Image (cartoon, rainbow, N blue to C red):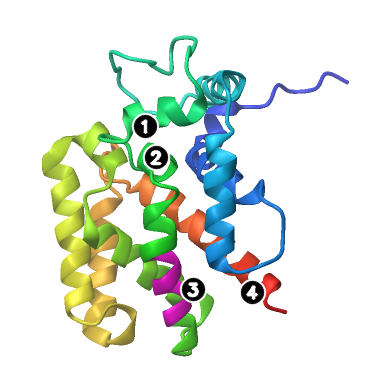
Amino acid sequence: MTRRPFDWRAATTWSGATTSVPPPTSVPHGGTEVALRGAVRTVLEDTTVDDAREVYAAIRRAAPGGLGRVEQQDVADEPTVTLLEAMRLGAGHDDIAHEYATGFEVTFERAVPTLQHARADGLCWSDAIVETFLGILAARPDSHVARRGGDRNGNASCRRACAAVAVGGVRTEEGRRAIADTDRALRDPRHLANPGTTADLMAAAIFVVLVDGIMKT
């Protein structure tokens, strides 16, 4: 029987998430959330040119949309610096690169505390995740949206998230209506308003919260 080749283009939904989650998964279990972030920093500092080469190859194979081109260490080329150094070069225009360059700043300082607070308040996982997602998106335009749809789309999605948060988000009926309106607006036919990087950061935050819970048991 002939085996059908894997459709890597269909897997692009996971390409950002699998880039944002591996550093936390590479650290030893045990300790606290603070220790976890410190260990993540150590893992990132120890990355090599070979690591960069493998990540670049994986991104090219997944072929996510909207990557664009950069002058230095473009993903279409073979890297000559470590993975962390490459990410630092892209930190100004890509949210995932910014996470690598800052030791996962948004993940640990915004997303994880928001998710933990939502769960402590009694929100179910689904509502807690939506609340956290909105908080991340309201704080800054999604870099994936900005690349694919331009700054106007990026700022518009950010404003919609802010508006939903302002009226209570998942915690009020008005907020839920605003979330539904935002969801419809982000589902444009050309996928130019899809906040994919925010979803990647959300995946990293969920992982950290789950691991932190395991560490404390």
Q: Of helix, strand and loop, which mostly describes the magenta segment?
A: helix
Residue marked by disc 2: 101
Residue 111 appears left or right of 29: left
Above or below, 185 relative to 43: below
Furthest toward the right, the residue is: 1
- Whether the residues at callouts 2 and 1 have beta carbons within 8 Å, the answer is yes
Name the kind of residue labelled 1 in the image.
Arg
- Whether the residues at callouts 1 and 4 have beta carbons within 8 Å, the answer is no
Disc 3 crowd rating (10 Å Cα; few below 14, some 14-19, many 20+) is: few
Q: CA distance from mark 3 to mark 1?
A: 33 Å
Q: CA distance from mark 2 to mark 1?
A: 5 Å
Name the kind of residue labelled 4 in the image.
Gly
Q: CA distance from mark 4 to mark 2?
A: 26 Å
Q: Is residue 66 visible?
A: no
Camera-near label (4 vs 3) is 4
Residue 48 appears left or right of 6: left
Camera-near label (4 vs 2) is 2
Name the kind of residue labelled 2 in the image.
Ala
**First in sequence: mark 4 vs mark 3:** 3
- Whether the residues at callouts 2 and 3 have beta carbons within 8 Å, the answer is no
Look at the image and give the residue range highlighted in magenta. 111-117
Name the kind of residue labelled 3 in the image.
Ser
Above or below, 121 relative to 184: below
